Structures are given as structure tokens and as C-alpha cells.
Amino acid sequence: MLDLLDASALAPQSLDYALSLPARFYTDPRMDAVDARSIFARSWQLVCHQTQVPDSGDHIVTTIAGLPLLAVRGEDGVIRAFHNVCRHRAGPIASCDGRGAKALRCRYHGWTYGLDGVLRGAPEMGRTPDFQPSEIRLPEVRVQVWQGLVFVAIGEAPPFAEIVAGIDERLGAERSLAHYALHHRASYDVACNWKVYVDNYLEGYHVPHIHPGLDRLLDYRSYITETAPWYSFQYSPLESASDLYGSGEALYYFIHPNTMLNILPGRLQTNRVLPLGVDRCRVEFDFYYPPDDSAQAHVRRRKDVAFSDEVQDEDVTICEDVQRGLASGSYEAGRLNPLRENAVHHFHELVRRAYREALGQA
């Protein structure tokens, strides 16, 4: 592994002289395990919005760093997250999202757990010596609900308040995300490493060249990117027709390592970038809107979804092109633009630090 994560590639770099991550960090098959262990298992991961689990027994299934998880709202109204792995013989407790479950039942042998994760019943185990169901429970992971969004951490991760420090103040009460409701999800499987997709998200440098439609809505000359310890954000004045977004501000937050909040007037869109292999990832787009069932709101939402699909198709194309370039053997690392790629540098520094910590070098 030392040949993959050598000290020279992991050394901190100043923004003015920074190079991008080496190509092998995006192409070597061993990076899947490195990223799962050093980044995804040690960070906060977005799971859903609280409105997706409004009632007792409502649940969401997901997987983080290879670990199946189940987030469920309990009878006491609290959202908890458990390993979605039965303590009997590792069967799945839930195979899909669901609503109103009274208990959590493994479909392999019927072992049944309460919404608090404690085993309630195990068929035909009544005469088993020293078997106490109440002593068996699903392992639980940390949950944090913030701005209506549900995050989980499966291992060591910084305190959540440090991750999002300053965002609440920047959004203000008028742009709180807590009262939005899920409209729909669109998923894209992209033939690139997950870090390629993140890199692309983190800079507006490519907008005039790749996104002509988006470029017409944003003011590139006023486009600003700032960084905080665990996140970065890009913002620009926005001007569009009243039946799309109207005028206001486009605000794009990246919360390390793979969560994106795209906040436009009257709309929240969250993105999760999920590794599927060293050269594949899935990007889940969840669209949220304030409660509004008017005809005008439906028109705006249709136009928003169509415009988002257009921008995403453009991003998919360039990200897949970049992955091919990284895998070609022609490229090792390139000089970053300090003016426009400061958030890319910020992300790369967090990645380098995670790798150093995994190797005990930090």
C-alpha cells in the first residue's frame, strides 16, 4: 500500500502551488478499500430528509462503506440507525424503504426486533439454553438531524456541529431546509471515480465551457467560492424567468466527503455521491420544495427538473471523459487554479489528511 500512498503524494500543499491528486488515486483498484476505510467510515453521511420518515416505523435502508444500515423512526419519535444485519445469521432486517412498521423482522428466519433495535422474538428458540432475547440488539450508529436532513456516522467522525459550523447563520431562518418536502429522486450511474465527480462539483471554472444554459443564469464575474474546515460553498447572483427560479442567489454547499446542497430560490436539491467501484459512482439527486400545490408551483418544478437533467447530462459527459484521461497513462497531476479551484484544493487536502491518518502519518 505504501507504493500507492507514498509520502510525497500525501504531503500538504499550499493553494498557490498546489497540484491535483495523482491519477492513481482515481484509477487504482485498491483505492476502493482505502476510501471506504479512511474516508466513508470516518465521516457523516446523508441518509434522507426527516419528512421521508414522518411516522413511527417509517424506515430507510442504505449502505455506507459496505455496511448495510437501517434508519427508523421509533415509537418515541426519535430517528435511530442500526446495522441492517440480523444477529442470528446476518440476514437483512429490511430489504427496502418502508412505512409504519410495528417491528423489524428479518426475512431469513423471522427474528423480530423492536423499533429500538432490541430482539423481541426468535421462532423456535424458546428452549435454547441461556438465550435471552432482551440481551440481543442491533448495533446502533450515531444519528444527527440538521436542517431537516438526517446524517449518520458509522465510525469515528468529528462532532457534527464542527462539520456544519456557520451554515445555519448563512442560510438564515427564511431559507431553513427543515420544512421542505421530498418531490422525487433521480439517480445517475457515472463511469468515473467518485472523487472525479466531487472535483467537478467544486469549481465554477468549467461553467462557461460546459454549461451554456447555467452560465446564462449565473454571473460568472461575481461567482465566489469560500471554504470552511469541513465544507465549501459557491455562490452567485441568479437571474431567471419567474416560472423557473426568478431572481436571487444560487448557493452550492459541499459537505465533506460526498454531500451537496444545491439551494436556489424555492428549491433544495441534495446530491449524494456513492462509490460503486474505482471507475464508477452513483449520484442520487433528491428534489425538495416548500409545500405548495398551486399550478404555478407545478410548472416551476417541471422546469427545474428538466433544467437540472440538462446540467447533469453535461456533467456526466465531462466526468466520464476525465476518468478516461486519468486512466490513459498520459496524466499524473496538474496545477490547480488558485482563483477558481480553491475548493478543489480544500477537498484534496482533506483527502490527503485522511490518507495520512489511515497510515498513521498525520
Image: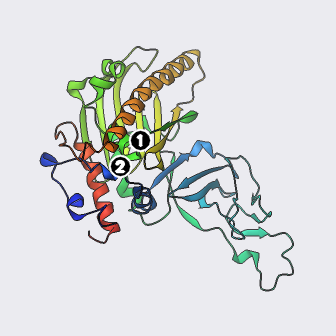
Q: Are marks 2 and 1 in contact (CB under 8 Å)?
A: yes
Q: Which residue is mark 1?
A: 192
Q: Quadrant of residue 85?
A: bottom right
Q: Amino acid at mark 1?
A: Cys
Kindly identify the residue that appears in the image at 35 percent across and 22 percent down. Answer: 214
Give how far across and how far down residue 49 sits, in percent.
55, 44
Q: Which residue is mark 2?
A: 26
Query: What is the crowding at mark 1: few (fewer than 14 residues within 10 Å), some, or many (at least 20)?
Result: many
- What is the distance, in whole Å, between disc 2 and disc 1 at their CAs? 8 Å
Q: Which amino acid, mark 2?
A: Tyr
Q: Earlier in the sequence, mark 2 or mark 1?
A: 2
Residue 318 position by quadrant: top left
Answer whether residue 256 is visible to the viewer in this image: no
* Percent position of residue 329, x then y: 29, 45
- Helix, strand or loop at label 2? It is helix
Can you see residue 287? yes
Q: Residue furthest bottom?
A: 129
The location of residue 233, given as percent across then percent down, is 31, 40
Q: Which residue is depicted at the point 59% across and 18% down?
A: 294
| Residue sitting at x 75%, y 60% | 106
Quadrant that contains the N terminus: bottom left
Query: Does residue 186 lie above or below 241 as drawn?
Result: below
- Quadrant where the C terminus is found in the figure: bottom left
